[in-house]
Image: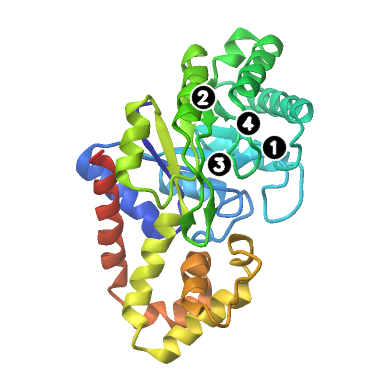
Amino acid sequence: MDIKFFIGPMSKNVVDSIINFQNKYSKKIALIPSRRQIDFKGGYSNNWTTESLSKYAKKIVIMRDHGGPGQGSKEDNGYKSLEYDCNYFDFIHIDPWKKFPSFNEGSKWTLEMIEFCLSKNPKIKFEIGTEEAIRRFEPEELELLIDYLKSNLSKEAFLQIKYLVIQSGTSLSSNQNTGNFDLERLKKMINVAKRNKLRSKEHNGDYISEDLIKLKMSYGLDAINIAPEFGLIETQTYLDHIKCEKNLFQRYWELCYQSKKWVKWVKNDFNPFEEKENLIKVCGHYILSNQDFVNDIKNEFPDIDLLIQKNIEKKLVSLHSV
């Protein structure tokens, strides 16, 4: 349980780097696959399924990130995905709040999904709550959510809840953390977690300094999620190699643009034709398993994976220095 960093498996290189880092430094790191990255039918990250990632990263703790309705590549209630998660992952983040932001509905869905998962695997463990970008919570609401679950779950079932998502001002847009950090909010939310013997975890820890992470953890934050930033490390490594290759740069941009994966991460006034490099930085990791990308760009640099993993390891070492 003493895991400080939960990393998104943005690509095979990210997962390989974490496996190697954990073996080399004896520091535990967990993976947090979203449903779009990796699900029971596959995803954009190395075309892995829930099962195949579990088998590939069998010595790594895996927590489903944002498990629930409205979080997959296609609209569904999330239950089929949860069934596979119960069989292959260690933790599930129960998150109905995107589709059901009202407190009463979201709480009810949280309870029902926990009960469903425990009926499939009594040993599965949970994270509850959600990030600020999906639904803002106040400390009092988190307390009410916990009380509701305590009242409606058996004692044994409630004890399977291990993590509470807390919020102190994080939000992502165009490779930036656009949130406004609120120390008092952080302290109040951490206290909610401590009072209820849950571990506090914040999402969207990308693109903030190690000093700020250290500050948050000095006040009791137990863990933090980081995902797109690791995708950008890999994307930037490719950009460094092709910056003088106009044809390769243009091809990378075309593949990113055509994927439309960048749309949700940029502001309304973003111009994809004038800000080509920024578009690639936002979207580049989504297409790393695209066969056209492999054929047209990756195969031009046969040794690039070693450099990418070296760059990712630098970031992991830097994070653990806090």
Q: Residue at x 47, y 32 (%)?
A: 201
Mark 2 neighbour density, 10 Å: few (under 14) some (14–19) many (20 or more):
many
> Which of the 4 image quarters holds residue 148?
top right
Note whether 57 is above or below 164 in the view shown. below
Q: Callout 3, which amino acid?
A: Asp
In this rendering, which labeled residue sits more in front, label 2 or label 1?
Answer: 2
**Residue 271: which numbered mark, if any?**
none
Q: Secondary structure at mark 2?
A: helix
Query: Marks 3 and 4, how far apart in space?
Result: 18 Å
Q: Callout 2, which amino acid?
A: Met
Spot occupied by residue 177 in the image (x, y as percentages of width and height): 47, 52
Query: Marks 2 and 1, how far apart in space?
Result: 18 Å
In this rendering, which labeled residue sits more in front, label 2 or label 3?
Answer: 2
Q: Residue at x 60, y 66 (%)?
A: 261
Upstream in the sequence, badge 3 or badge 4?
3
Check disc 2 and report the residue beneath it: 189
Q: Residue at x 51, y 44 (%)?
A: 170
Mark 4 neighbour density, 10 Å: few (under 14) some (14–19) many (20 or more):
some
Query: Marks 4 and 1, how far apart in space?
Result: 11 Å
Check disc 4 and report the residue beneath it: 137
Query: Which quarter of the image is occupied by the C terminus?
Result: top left
Check disc 3 and report the residue beneath it: 65
Note whether 291 is above or below 209 in the view shown. below
Q: Secondary structure at mark 4?
A: loop
Query: Marks 1 and 3, how far apart in space?
Result: 13 Å
Query: Marks 4 and 2, how far apart in space?
Result: 10 Å
Check disc 1 and report the residue beneath it: 97
Q: Callout 1, which amino acid?
A: Trp
Spot occupied by residue 258 in the image (x, y as percentages of width and height): 62, 77
Tell me if I can see residue 191 in this picture: yes
